[in-house]
Amino acid sequence: MSENFAKGTVENLEQLKNVDFLKNLPEDVLETVVNDCLLMGLEDGEVLFEDGEEGSSMFVILSGRLIVIKQ
């Protein structure tokens, strides 16, 4: 994974307000989500996680595309 991490911003707060499963949350909850999240970037073809890996994170795609392949 790319070493391209940053903290969330006010712009990201506005983006999360447009995510279907987050948009009805109170603004203070969304602010907490943004403050606790890390932004990351992936290069073309880079793998975010592998099928079967135990998860401990939630990912929200703010821009671009992600291909999901079930193996």
Image (spheres, grey):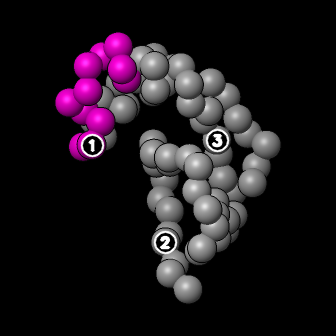
Determine the CA span between mark 1 and mark 2.
19 Å
Identify the secondary structure beneath mark 2.
Answer: loop
Residue shown at 50% from the left, 81% from the top? 70
Determine the CA span between mark 3 and mark 1.
21 Å
Q: Residue furthest right?
A: 3
Residue 63 seen by the camera: no
Residue 7 seen by the camera: yes
Task: Give the amino acid at mark 3.
Answer: Met
| Residue on which disc 2 sits | 68
Q: Which residues are magenta?
A: 20-30
From the top left corner, tell me how far across and down residue 54 is, in percent. 61, 62
Residue shown at 69% from the left, 56% from the top? 43
Q: Which quarter of the rendered picture does the N terminus lie within?
A: bottom right
Identify the secondary structure beneath mark 3.
Answer: strand
Q: Is residue 25 above or below residue 5?
A: above
In this picture, residue 56 sits left or right of residue 31: right
| Residue on which disc 3 sits | 40
Foreground residue, 70 or 11? 70
Q: Is residue 15 above or below residue 47?
A: above
Q: Nearer the viewer, mark 3 or mark 1?
A: 1
From the top left corner, tell me how far across and down residue 41 is, in percent. 65, 45
Main SS, magenta residues: loop
Residue shown at 24% from the left, 43% from the top? 20
| Residue on which disc 1 sits | 21
